[in-house]
Amino acid sequence: MDNFIQFIKTDEFLSITFVINIILLIGFIVNIIKFSKLDNKYKNFMKKIGDGKNIEEDLETFMHVVRNVEKRNEEIAMLQDLQEISDGKIYGCNDMVRAACGDCAGCHACCEEMGTSIVLDPCDIWRLTTVTGKNFEQLLADTIELQVVDGVILPNLRMDGEKEQCVFLNEQGRCRIHAMRPGLCRVFPLGRIYEEKGFRYFLQVYECEKKDRLKVKVKKWIDIPDPARHDKFISDWHAYLKKQEEILENDSSDESRKAVSMGILNTFYVRNYDRTRDFYEQFYERLEETEAVL
């Protein structure tokens, strides 16, 4: 005991004590710095939770990047598929394309055995009700039928008889409603490829049986009245259907599928269009109705 008392009185003990205190002080300072950094991170995180905006913005930005990558991958895959069925070119409405087939003289192959592929949009139904004088329910009796397209129910042009011919094909193999024919009939043998802002066309090289087709401007070939407004309608209708498909991806229950399909049919098809009014005005009125509900 006496030895210990004598030791703590020495300079050596004081030096050891000083060194230990210095080490403890340094450790204390380091811990304060670490705690301060951790506290700042915690406050920033809590601020994000409190606002509810920053985290959502970060997540939305991340999801936007993911969606862009997925979309780009889909576009690449689609373009690879197009290489197999087209001439490898993409056409705008003012481009020349080798689609002219001499007014289809002596041929109506594209009006037979098309199955359910002639899907009808609201403008097509407006044309058909106008030219036939029938409403949607009456068209269902003998002209059109319903099918599931990408999860939603849409109408298509019916094929009838042993040869599975279009119901509007006459005995001479000519279209009885050519001036009011559906949009997909107008673009054939072209197809649409949808992009972020609108769409363009590609030529299906194996679909039309006519050989030695001549070049014609895409816009002239499609021959649609008021092409700018029609193109906008096509883009907006496509975007609307994609939104409905996204809804069903999040909720694929039978009740949801029924509600979405019945909403589309009743709003854009079953409800009669005023044949004396501009179609596009009526369409966008109905589109606004659906957006107001959403």
Image: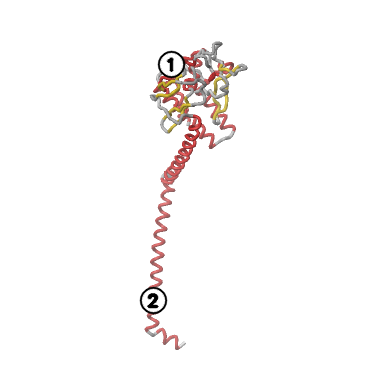
Does residue 97 appear in this view? yes
The percent position of residue 36, horizontal first and vertical second, equals: 39, 60
The percent position of residue 69, horizontal first and vertical second, equals: 45, 41
Residue matched to label 2: 19
Q: Amino acid at mark 2?
A: Val
Residue for point 42% across, 85% down:
7
48 lies above or below 223: below
Which residue is at the front of the view, 139 or 194? 194
Left or right, 6 with respect to 145, comes to left
The percent position of residue 169, horizontal first and vertical second, equals: 54, 14
- Whichever of callouts 1 and 2 sits on the residue coming sooner in the sequence is 2
Residue for point 40% across, 78% down:
17
The percent position of residue 244, horizontal first and vertical second, equals: 51, 31
- The Cα atoms of the two marked residues, 1 and 2, are separated by 95 Å
Circle number at residue 277: 1
Which residue is at the front of the view, 193 or 215? 215
